[in-house]
Amino acid sequence: MQSNNQLFYTPKATFLTDKSILFGLTNYSLSALSSNGEFNFEKILDSYSQSFSTMEWNTDPQHLIEESVLHHLLNSDITSIFIRMECNANIFRENGVIFSDHWTQFITSLSEYSSVKKNMILSFDRNTHYSKELLESFLTLREEIIPIELFFECDHHSWKNPSALKIIRGGKIKVVQRDIPDLAGFNFHIANPDKKECYLRLLGRNKVNWFSTEKKIRYQYDYTKAELEQIISKINSLRMSYEKIYVIGCNSPSHSAISNVRQLSKLYQLD
């Protein structure tokens, strides 16, 4: 059986064969790369960049990435960074996070790095229902943080309604796509109207525990080869519409995400 490090340390060419298809992982998978209990962040980022061009870093608006971590992350050879913030409507309230000095300093720090493509994903949680005001605030924020590009992700079915879809299409909002369990009544899909970039998160297909409040349990899943082949077919279909596609392994545990992305890259080369 291969160790986690063996799954990870693979030739760069394996993952970077096509500049229009970028495979990557979340920061949660980085912990699987430490050895003997030692976690050297700079070395792990360096090794990561040898195999991947993109990464998703998960955080939340109340606990933004530490300055030292952000510095190492943006000074690495990873060419495209996605900072995904799990949030709710409070982010836009008068005393919300985006009006704080902490937020301003964070956005300024991000903007100062010119060698890295910076992206931010606002992911609204399962309890955040659609509102026109919330979506319009999102559009305003998108303009305010240029050149950082803003993506949208939602987890409540109320967002799939004619009013919301009209705003999303009209504003060409970049909507995150997700591979999730096929559960009748819950597996809703909102198309991404932006034709330049598509972001696909692989969350696993754990039907039994999909409604668990524990993410490690909810996303615990190891894709089969047949399922990965389905995802390759989806990627090829997406290539017909988008210039660049990001594919991020978000399932757990870490070694499953690493293994699955590795298998995906190989299948993509063989396709």
Image (spheres, grey):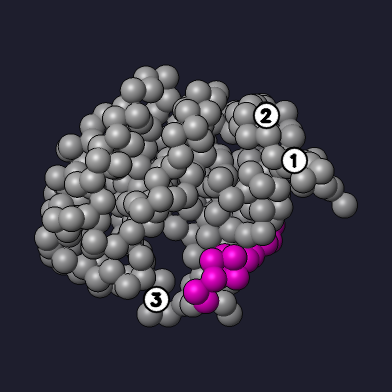
Label 3 belongs to which residue? 186
In the rendered structure, the answer to whether residue 133 lies left or right of residue 8 reads: left
- Whether residue 223 appears in magenta in the rendering, the answer is yes
- Whether residue 269 appears in magenta in the rendering, the answer is no
Residue depicted at 51% across the width and 35% down the height: 69
Query: Does residue 182 appear in this view?
Result: yes
Label 1 belongs to which residue? 38
Closer to the chain start, of discs 3 and 2, is: 2
Q: Position of residue 259 (x, y in %)?
A: 70, 49
Identify the amino acid type marked 2.
Lys
Q: Pick the residue in front: 190 or 97.
A: 97
Give the Cα distance between marks 3 and 2: 41 Å
Identify the amino acid type marked 3.
Phe
Which secondary structure lies at badge 1?
loop
Identify the amino acid type marked 1.
Glu
Which secondary structure lies at badge 2?
helix
Q: Which mark is residue 43?
A: 2
Main SS of residues in magenta: loop
The residue range painted magenta reads 212-226
Residue depicted at 67% across the width and 29% down the height: 43
Give the Cα distance between marks 1 and 2: 11 Å
